[in-house]
Image (spheres, helix red, strand yellow):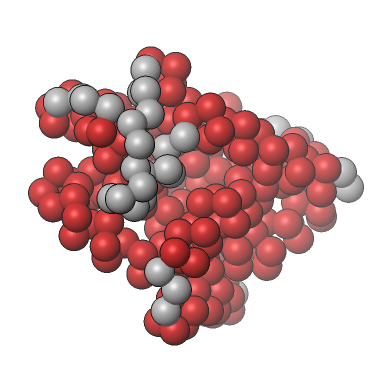
Amino acid sequence: MLLNILIYGILAGLATIAGMFLVLKNESWARKNTIYLISFSAGVLLSVAFSHLIPEALDLNSNALLWLLFGFVFFYILEHLIIIHSCQEDDSCTVHPIDKIALLGMGFHSLMDGIIIGIGFEISNTLGLLTTLAVLLHKLPDGISMVSVLLHSDYSKTKARNSSLLVASMTPIGAILSFLFLKNISTGILGIFLAVAAGSFLYIASADLIPEIHKKSKILNIVLLLIGIFIPILVSLYLK
């Protein structure tokens, strides 16, 4: 299990790094074409949350829906303080100050993504793979948004790259920490973690990704979102 957690945690971190390099290489191209990945990613996040995380959480903890609400509100507050998704559009981007507290918040979000992967594998390999897929897909747009904001905040390319690498490293670290410290926790606590994870997935999909899809709405975006919804369901059926 540790090998799975380590491998998939590193893959999720690499997705953030891939987004960073896309921007550093060609920012305008990255922003223009990520909309298709965003559409697919939104579908995956919604599907994994509703078809897997929430049912599993309710089986493990009767108060799971309250913890889901907590997770949703918590990530709203966290992102409101950071404001990392506001520079998707070239024409509407304004400069937002990125200081140590904001970078700390981004790092914590990445740490939580890693913990979500570890918790998923604690429940089952299927849930671990699906949570990894959901995390991995939204980490690439995260990487693009994060390094874009850093550059717009007058960070040098070297400083933006190094800061992004540090944030990306938090995902595999979170996955390893979850294995070391959460493997023997009670089922009720596991249910809480899954519910908070579901809340974060629903928040990212509804507040970050879907609004971006509406800005460039095309039939292809709808198709990709629907494909993203069905892929986790098909994967879970295949792995059973």
Q: Can residue 197 be seen in this view?
A: yes
Residue extending farthest right: 62
Looking at the image, which is closer to me, 209 or 119? 209
Q: In which quarter of the image is residue 70?
A: top right
Q: In this view, does 105 lie above or below 52?
A: above
- Left/right of residue 206 with respect to residue 104 in the rendered view: right
Residue 119 point in image, percent of width and height: 59, 44
- Left/right of residue 40 with respect to residue 58 in the rendered view: left
Looking at the image, which is closer to me, 215 or 42? 215
Give me the residue at 21% from left, 25% from top: 154
Q: Can residue 12 be seen in this view?
A: no
Give me the residue at 14% from left, 26% from top: 156
Give me the residue at 66% from left, 34% from top: 74
Residue 63 point in image, percent of width and height: 87, 44
Q: In which quarter of the image is residue 181?
A: top right
Residue extending farthest top: 100
The C terminus sits in image quarter: bottom right
Residue 52 point in image, percent of width and height: 66, 62
Residue 231 point in image, percent of width and height: 50, 76
